[in-house]
Image (cartoon, rainbow, N blue to C red):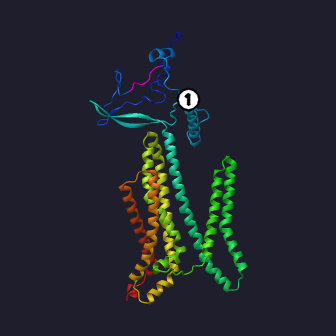
C-alpha cells in the first residue's frame, strides 16, 4: 500500500454508514407502496443523504471544506458498561461541563431511529428513518416517572389495606378482651396476651424477612432488598400503631347543629368508612389520571424503535400492576362496607321493627354511601385534574373523561354497597317480612 493512501475493503461493512447513524442506514420507501424504494442522487441537495463510504485526511478535508473542516468530534465516555441512571448522570455532567466551556454538545448515547413521513414534491409521501438523539435518556426519564407514580399508588393502596386489616382484627379482638375482663382477667394479663399474639403475628415475620434480606445482601453485596425490607417493616408497625389508636378511640355521637341525620351518621361511623374512602379516592385518581399519563408516557417512549421495543417488553408488567391495584382497592371497599353493615346490624333491625320495608332501609343507607362516596370521588377527580394540568394540556376530552370516571366509580361503589347489604342482611329473607 502506498504512503498517503487508504484501503477500506476490509472495513466495508463498518464504513457503509456514519457511526452516529446521522445519514441513515436504511432505504426510504413510498408510504403508499412499501415495495418502491428510493435512492440518493448525485445532484447536490438531494433529500436523501448519501451514506459515508470512505475516509479522508485532514489535508484533503481542508481543500474540500476550507480552513475549518471538522464539524463535530465524537467523544466516548469511559467506565460505562450499559445505559442506566448512573451512566446518564455521568454523560450529562460531562456535557454540561463542555457546554460551560463554550462548546455545543449533543448527547448521542442511546440514539435510535424513528420513522418520519416526508412530503417530496413530484414523488409523494416518503417514509424515511431519522436518528433521534438521546432516545435512551428520554425513555429512562419517562420510565422513572412512571415507576415513581406506580410506586406511590402501590404504597397508598397497600398501606390502606394493611391498616384496615389491622383495625378489623383489633376491633374483633376487643370484644374478646371485654369478655376476658368480665371473666376476671386483669388489664395487665389482657395486655400481655395481646402483646404475645401480635408479636407472633408481626415481629417473627419481620425478623425472618430482615435476616433473609441481610443474608442476600452479604452474598450479593447489594443491600437494596434489606433497605426495602426495613422500610416495609417500619410501615407495617406504623399501620399497627395507627390501627390500635383508632380502635382505642371510642366513637361518640356528636350532635352537629344544622346537620342532617345522614351527615351525623357518617361522622359517627367514620373509622369504619375511612379505608373505603381512601381506596375510592385512589381508584378515582388511577381511573382519571393514569390513562392520560400512560398515553403521554407511551407517546414519548414509542417515538423511536428502541422505545417501541422496550414498551413491548414492559407493557404486560404495567397491566398486571394496575390490575392488582384495582383488585386490592375493590377488596378493601367490599370489606369496609361489610364491616360497616355488621356494626349497624342493630340499627337495621330497629328500622325493621318500626315498619320500614327492605327498599326503604336500603335507600336510607345508600344515601349515606352516596354522600361519602361522592366526596371521595370528587376529591380524587380534583387531585387528578391538578396533576394532569402539570403534565399535559387540559382539554374537553380530559375533563369529560374525569366526569365519566366519577360517575362510573360512584356507580360501582353503590352497586357494591347494595350487593353487600343484600348478602349480609337480606339473603334468604322473604320480602314480605319488610313490607308495611
**Looking at the image, residue 369 lies above or below residue 329:** below
**Magenta span dominant secondary structure:** loop
* Most foreground residue, 65 or 117: 65
Q: Is residue 362 left or right of residue 81?
A: left
Q: Residues within 10 Å of mark 1 (few under 14, many from 20)?
A: few
Q: Position of residue 276 (x, y in %)?
A: 50, 69
Image quadrant assignment for residue 38: top left
> Of all residues shown, which one is farthest toward the left?
122
Residue at left 67%, top 86%? 182
Q: Position of residue 347 (x, y in %)?
A: 49, 84
Q: Read off the residue under disc 1.
A: 75
* Quarter of the image that includes the C terminus: bottom left
Q: Position of residue 163 (x, y in %)?
A: 58, 67
**Looking at the image, residue 315 lies above or below residue 6:** below
Residue at left 50%, top 51%? 146
- Tell whether position 373 is magenta: no
Residue at left 44%, top 23%? 52
* Most foreground residue, 8 or 74: 74
**Looking at the image, residue 63 lies above or below residue 393:** above
- Tell whether position 50 is magenta: yes
Residue at left 68%, top 68%? 200
Which stretch appears magenta?
Answer: 49-54
Q: Position of residue 391 (x, y in %)?
A: 45, 51
* Most foreground residue, 285 or 230: 285
Amino acid at each position: 500500500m502506498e504512503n498517503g493512501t487508504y484501503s477500506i475493503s476490509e472495513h466495508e461493512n463498518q464504513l457503509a454508514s456514519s457511526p452516529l447513524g446521522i445519514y441513515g442506514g436504511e432505504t426510504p420507501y413510498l408510504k403508499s407502496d412499501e415495495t418502491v424504494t428510493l435512492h440518493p442522487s448525485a445532484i447536490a441537495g438531494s433529500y436523501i443523504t448519501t451514506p459515508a463510504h470512505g475516509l479522508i485526511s485532514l489535508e484533503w478535508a481542508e481543500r474540500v471544506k476550507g480552513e475549518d473542516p471538522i464539524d463535530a468530534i465524537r467523544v466516548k465516555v469511559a467506565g460505562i458498561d450499559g445505559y442506566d441512571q448512573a451512566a446518564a448522570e455521568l454523560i450529562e455532567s460531562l456535557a454540561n461541563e463542555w457546554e460551560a466551556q463554550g462548546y455545543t454538545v449533543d448527547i448521542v448515547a442511546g440514539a435510535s431511529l424513528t420513522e418520519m413521513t416526508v412530503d417530496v414534491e413530484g414523488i409523494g409521501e416518503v417514509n424515511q428513518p431519522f436518528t433521534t438523539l438521546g432516545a435512551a435518556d428520554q425513555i429512562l426519564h419517562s420510565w422513572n416517572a412512571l415507576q415513581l407514580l406506580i410506586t406511590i399508588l402501590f404504597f397508598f393502596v397497600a398501606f390502606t389495606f394493611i391498616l384496615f386489616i389491622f383495625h378489623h382484627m383489633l376491633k374483633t379482638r376487643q370484644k374478646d378482651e371485654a369478655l376476658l375482663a368480665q371473666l376476671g382477667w386483669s388489664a395487665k394479663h389482657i395486655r400481655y396476651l395481646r402483646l404475645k399474639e401480635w408479636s407472633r403475628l408481626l415481629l417473627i415475620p419481620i425478623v425472618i424477612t430482615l435476616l433473609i434480606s441481610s443474608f442476600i445482601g452479604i452474598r450479593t453485596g447489594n443491600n437494596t432488598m434489606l433497605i426495602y425490607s426495613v422500610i416495609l417493616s417500619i410501615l407495617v408497625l406504623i399501620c399497627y400503631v395507627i390501627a390500635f389508636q383508632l380502635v382505642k378511640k371510642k366513637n361518640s355521637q356528636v350532635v352537629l347543629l344544622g346537620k342532617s341525620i345522614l351527615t351525623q351518621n357518617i361522622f359517627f361511623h367514620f373509622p369504619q368508612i375511612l379505608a373505603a374512602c381512601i381506596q375510592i379516592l385512589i381508584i378515582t385518581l388511577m381511573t382519571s389520571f393514569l390513562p392520560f399519563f400512560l398515553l403521554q408516557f407511551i407517546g414519548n417512549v414509542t417515538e423511536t424503535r428502541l422505545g417501541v421495543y422496550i414498551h413491548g417488553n414492559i407493557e404486560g408488567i404495567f397491566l398486571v400492576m394496575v390490575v392488582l391495584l384495582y383488585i386490592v382497592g375493590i377488596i378493601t371497599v367490599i370489606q369496609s362496607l361489610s364491616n360497616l353493615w355488621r356494626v349497624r346490624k342493630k340499627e337495621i333491625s330497629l328500622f325493621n321493627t318500626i315498619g320500614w320495608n327492605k327498599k326503604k332501609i336500603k335507600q336510607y343507607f345508600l344515601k349515606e354511601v352516596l354522600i361519602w362516596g361522592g366526596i371521595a370521588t370528587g376529591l380524587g377527580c380534583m387531585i387528578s385534574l391538578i396533576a394532569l394540568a402539570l403534565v399535559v394540556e387540559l382539554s374537553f376530552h380530559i375533563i369529560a373523561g374525569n366526569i365519566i370516571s366519577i360517575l362510573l366509580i360512584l356507580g360501582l361503589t353503590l352497586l357494591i354497597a347494595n350487593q353487600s347489604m343484600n348478602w349480609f342482611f337480606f339473603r334468604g329473607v322473604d320480602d314480605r317480612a319488610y313490607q308495611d
